[in-house]
Amino acid sequence: MIQSTNLRKELGQSLSPSAPVPVKVIGLFNTGTNIVQNLVDLNFNESVLVFPNDMIDGYRERRLDQIMAQANDCLDGWKHIMPSFQTDPDCHKCDGEAADAVVVSVIRNPIPWMIAMRQEGRGYDLTSCFQGDDWLSRECSWPSCSDKTSWDTGNPDKGWCDMTSKCSQQTMEKAKFDNVAQLWIQSVKDADALDDFGFKKNVVIRYEDLVKKPEHELGRVAKKVGVDVTNFQQVPDDQPERCRECNFTEDGSDVMPPFPRQGCHDCSQDRHAKAVYWIDNKQHLKYLEELGENINEWCNAFGHEGKKLMCDHGYTDCGC
């Protein structure tokens, strides 16, 4: 069991003045949170502690003592939870005794985000919200631990259903949204309000900037942490298993026709270059055309509020 900083204080224990700075990463599924976690670990090394860290191979084992020294309810909270749904004040108190935490929120253009969520195996807990002919207009509810029938994929006996942490996934259990667009709207509104939630040191990163200029975006985090980024390291190109079944053009830059093959749209022999190409050339709009989807219907789901948020953050697919 992780010992929190508050408990350590009660026991009269103290942290080293050179204790690493906690960096908490939050954001919806498929927004790039894993990329941020790995970039921070690769480039900041012992200067920081990444929360959560389960997606970084061997991280917990090699940093266990430091994690135990700094962990608290806020840092241990699930990264996909929106702060507005965390009603317990402790879920917004990430700062430790030795250092103030840096909270990094990742957002993404909602059109390619919804495309990603609709890909097989990538909707995660919200798979049912992105399925069916009426998925754009239908109410979206977070799966419930008390109602196992709400789980439509995988094992309904999810491990997080047994968690007792006040900031665990169960925080979202009763969350309901008018439609999937409202998921994105609320997450971006929360990102814009990090100061109001009490996160004194925070950074909002767009997935698109993270992909196109990762060193610059990491530098923004570094300023909050109080370190310099030297000898920047990119996350290794570790493509999903499904990409091995894709056929590429001779130069390896794109997926072979028919375009795009299900599950191959984000694959490439150079995945990072492919991601940049997709963003620069708005390939997600061509993807919708190939699927016979109407971009106007997707945009209308966001309403005036959502379209304004899109424009505020530089996303112009629905007009500004």
Image: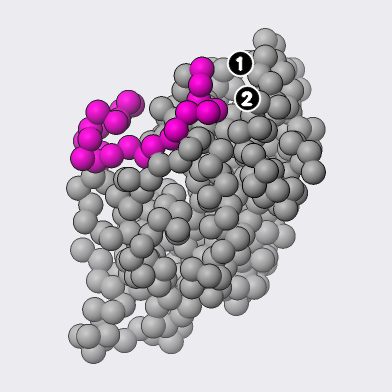
The quarter of the picture where the N terminus appears is bottom left
Does dot 2 land on a helix, a strand or a loop?
Answer: loop
Q: Identify the residue under disc 2.
A: 265
Query: Residue 113 appears in which quarter of the rendering?
Result: top right
Q: Are marks 1 and 2 in contact (CB under 8 Å)?
A: yes
Q: Quadrant of the C terminus?
A: top right
Camera-side residue of 166 and 276: 166
Provide the residue span drawn in magenta.
Answer: 133-159
SS at circle 1:
loop
Q: Is residue 135 magenta?
A: yes
Q: Residues within 10 Å of mark 1 (few under 14, many from 20)?
A: few
Alpha carbon distance from label 1 to label 2? 6 Å
Q: Is residue 279 left or right of residue 261?
A: right
Left or right: where 100 falls relative to 268: left
Q: Please, which residue is most extreme toward the top here? A: 258
Asked if the magenta segment contains residue 201, the reply would be no
Residue drawn at (37%, 39%) of the image: 142
Residue 10 visible here: yes
Residue furthest to the bottom? 12
Q: Could you tell me which residue is drawn at 56 percent across and 64 percent down?
A: 193
Q: Which residue is mark 1?
A: 261
Most foreground residue, 172 or 77: 172
**Residue 61 percent coordinates (x, y):** 32, 58
Q: Estimate the x, y position of residue 206 in percent, counting from the top left.
A: 65, 51
Seen in the picture, residue 306 relative to 98 is either above or below; the reply is: above
> What amino acid type is highlighted by mark number 2?
His
In the rendered view, tell whether residue 111 sits above or below residue 263. below
